[in-house]
Image: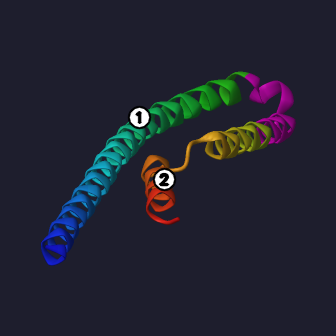
Amino acid sequence: MTDHNFSDTSRRLGAATLDLLSDHAELFALELQEQKRHSSQQLIWLGITAACGFMLFLLLNGLLIMSLWPHYEHKLLIAMSAFYAIAGGLCIWRMKSAQSRAQAPFSASLQELKNTKERLLP
């Protein structure tokens, strides 16, 4: 009789463990797919933005140099270089601050694994 109860208990424990592993794998796959979609979407928008920004940058710089060169000559190039250095620094700072605020990838999976460990271990 106790052998039968032990067998039922071990079967239930095995089924619960498999179900738990299945849930964790499903959550991990979902988060992985979400991260992949988010990253590819961000890369596409980054590429389009970079191409448009570069074209605008070239055209505006050419217009500025053509219109102000007779009056300011080399001072214009120095001022433009300083401006773009400051703007680039601000962009890098903004990107780093956005990365520090972003939620860690797979945080839901890690939290679920932690919860499971707390439930299973005394």
Q: Which of 52/25 is in front?
A: 25
Is 50 displayed left or right of 21 in the figure? Answer: right
Residue found 49% across the figure and 38% down from its top: 50
Q: Main secondary structure of the magenta part?
A: helix
Mark 2 surroundings within 10 Å by alpha-carbon count, few (fewer than 14), some (14 through 19), many (20 or more): few
Is 21 displayed left or right of 47 in the figure? Answer: left
Instruction: Residue 55 in the image: state x and y as whole percent.
Output: 49, 33
Instruction: Residue 22 in the image: state x and y as whole percent.
Output: 23, 57
Element marked by disc 1: helix
Q: CA distance from mark 2 to mark 1?
A: 37 Å
- Does 102 sit above or below residue 19? above
Residue labelled with disc 2: 115
Q: Mark 1: which amino acid?
A: Trp
Segment tinted magenta in the rendering? 68-83
- Queried whether the magenta region covers residue 32, the answer comes back as no
**Quadrant of the snapshot with the N terminus:** bottom left
Q: Which of 28/39 is in front?
A: 28
Residue found 27% across the figure and 52% down from its top: 23
Q: Mark 2: which amino acid?
A: Asn
The quadrant in which residue 46 appears is top left
* Mark drawn on residue 45: 1
Q: First in sequence: mark 2 or mark 1?
A: 1
**Count of numbered badges drawn on the protein:** 2
- Does 37 sit above or below residue 26? above
Instruction: Residue 62 in the image: state x and y as whole percent.
Output: 61, 31
Q: Which of 104/120 is in front?
A: 120
The quadrant in which residue 101 appears is top right
Is 102 displayed left or right of 13 in the figure? Answer: right
Q: Residue furthest front?
A: 1
Residue found 77% across the figure and 42% down from its top: 81
Residue found 75% across the figure and 38% down from its top: 90
Q: Which of 43/49 is in front?
A: 43
